[in-house]
Image: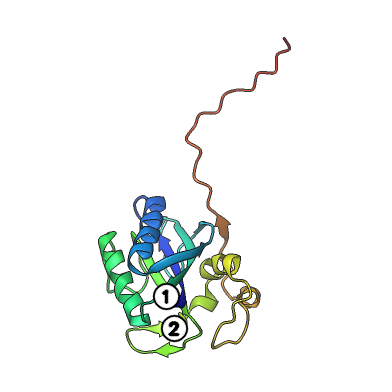
Amino acid sequence: MNIVFLGIGANLGDRDSSLKNAISGIGEHIGSVLKSSSIYETDAWGFETSNKFLNMVVEVETQLSPSGVLGAILMIEAHLGRIRSEKQYSSRAIDIDILLYDDLIIDKKSLKVPHPLMHERQFVLVPLCEIAPELIHPILKKPISSLIELCPDKTKVEIYRPHDRTTARPQDNSLE
């Protein structure tokens, strides 16, 4: 069995449901989800939009090869409404990236592992550090917890707290 870390993000539509559906698809088509980070809300990285992203990282145990994981990701994304654009960075209903696959280093046109920009993105490092702080980046040879401190990205990454849809009742301060 192999261990793969996947970054998941969405900023269009029902972002919560998109993440939940992505995790379900990952469990069904890639392997057992061993750990999942909290959900974080962030501004877009690399382009301008008013739609904030929800991001998280999952650790998955899989029998698939790296290219098999990529194929399953593309299928899951398409099923969840991902429309690929010519633009490198754009809003999306769902985005799933292979961050790490065991300690492999893969540098092909169609697949690069570890993800070549993960160490430059707080929205990846913060949730990854939550579930695997001591994990060593196979190229940089540093733990994820150290990469956060070295990261040039200063984008705010906050735990996502969905709006409470219940109506608050005024507190009754009367004495009986």
Where is mark 2, residue-wise?
A: 113
Residue 110 relative to residue 39: left or right: left
Q: Residue at image x 55%, y 28%?
A: 168
Q: Secondary structure at mark 1?
A: strand
Residue 11 in sight here: no
Given contact means CB atoms under 8 Å apart, are the residues at marks 2 and 1 in contact? yes
Q: Residue at image x 31%, y 71%?
A: 72
| Sooner in the amino-acid sequence: mark 2 or mark 1 | 1
Q: Amino acid at mark 2?
A: Val
Location of the N terminus (image quadrant): bottom left
Q: Position of residue 67 (x, y in %)?
A: 33, 81
Residue 45 relative to residue 127: left or right: left
Compared with 109, 153 (above or below) is: above
Location of the C terminus (image quadrant): top right
Residue 104 in sight here: yes
Task: Find the residue positioned furthest to the right.
Answer: 175
Q: Position of residue 46 (x, y in %)?
A: 44, 71
Check residue 98 in the rendering and tell me which mark sits there, or answer none: 1
Q: Amino acid at mark 1?
A: Ile
Q: Residue at image x 29%, y 59%?
A: 80
Task: Find the residue positioned furthest to the front.
Answer: 1
Q: How is the image coloured?
A: rainbow
Nearer to me, 154 or 175? 175
Residue 34 relative to residue 173: left or right: left
Q: Secondary structure at mark 2?
A: strand
